[in-house]
Image (tube, rainbow, N blue to C red):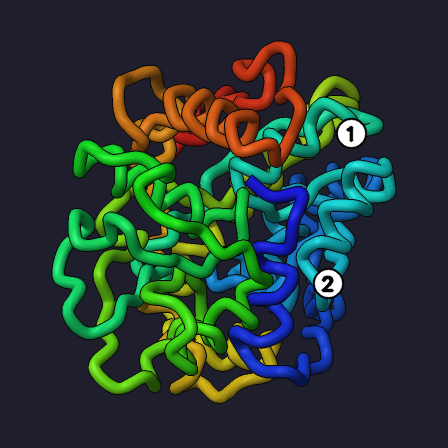
Amino acid sequence: MRRQRFLSTCLAFAFGLVVAVGCASNAPETGSEPSAPEVAAADAAPLVIGYSNWPGWLPWAVAEEKGLFAENGANVELKWFDGYLASMEAFAAGQLDGNGQTLNDTISFAADAANGEVAVLVNDNSAGNDKVIVAEGINSVADLKGKTVALEEGVVGDFMLTQALEDAGMSRSDITIKNLETGAAAAAFASGQVDAVAAWPPFWGIALEREGSKELLSSKDYPGAIPDLLVMSQKVIDEQPEQVQAMVNTWFATLDYIAKNPEESNKIMAARSGVTVEEYENFKAGTRIFTVEENLEAFSAGDGMKHMPFASQKMNDFMVDVGFIEAGPDDLGAILDDSFVKAYAEGS
């Protein structure tokens, strides 16, 4: 939900203003025989994959440093973007084979993307990193009626708040929305100019500096509202499906590696973010990394935001209703491809 700046601003600040030097890939040990997947990867055209500073995408840095792409047959060149918006623009222009991005952004860019955009993997869901902060005296969503809320229209915070209003039998027309860039929205709330704000880190931290302020709701309350994905071009899916499969396989191999080597992995991911391990772990706490089973559920049909076919339609309708996009893709189902996750699940 954003031809905007959801993580473009978040990425510049959430893990620090200075981005650490990228991690270099580890080559196989000298003298060791290459495995069959490594040989296959060497013969395949390299995939250029964009990613940026969000906890759910940082495991790719571990995959790169520990040589897990080659081990799983993926010939990949990771491209780091300091700004999330720049990664989406590069992908839509056909300069990348894949990118880490949210479902709403995939919807908003897919129709105009040079080579098509298709989600093949759910990396994570925001599980508390996106919040609505309110002033003293506001204790429920119903209490927001007639109040002024600062937010960036059309972005994930706006979408999440809209879901909360609907659940309370209300709508956006029951509140006054002050459309501001998220940093400015947080500052306006902190200075007492508005009654509430929707923000992501670190901006909700700024908002909470206001005396008496508190969290009203967060993305933890709305599972599925903010999924973060590996999105590949339709061109690559058609021409190099084995490499897309290798990417998905590498992801789950990376999660296994992280589970077995948490301290080392956290150091790698924190360094890629340009923050301390302690700072990284604080932000990671609001991010729920998805298992294979959760991926299968997310791709499946069903009523509720946990199911991406359902969520896609809700997000598309929301963005059109608020004038964020004129129209989404003609076929929303075409931006979701669960075949690679299913193949991994069947083979694991």
Q: Report which quarter residue 13 is drawn in.
A: bottom right
* Kind of element beneath mark 2: strand
Identified by mark 1, the residue type is Ala
Which residue is more in the foreground, 134 or 219? 134
Write down the residue under mark 2.
Answer: 80
Which class describes the residues within 10 Å of circle 2: few (<14), some (14-19), or many (20+)? some
Which residue is more in the foreground, 340 or 161? 161
Lateral position of residue 308 relative to residue 2, left or right: left
* Kind of element beneath mark 1: loop
Which residue is found at the position 81% from the left and 46% from the top? Answer: 90
Question: Where is residue 240 drawn, in percent x and y?
Answer: 75, 26
Which residue is more in the foreground, 92 or 247? 92
Question: Where is residue 186 drawn, in percent x and y?
Answer: 46, 72
Report whether residue 92 is seen. yes
Write down the residue under mark 1.
Answer: 113
Question: Where is residue 329 drawn, in percent x and y?
Answer: 64, 18
Identified by mark 2, the residue type is Trp
Which residue is found at the position 61% from the left and 41% from the top? Answer: 247
Which class describes the residues within 10 Å of circle 1: few (<14), some (14-19), or many (20+)? some
Which residue is found at the position 53% from the left and 33% from the top? Answer: 322
Cα gap from disc 1 to disc 2, whole angstroms: 20 Å
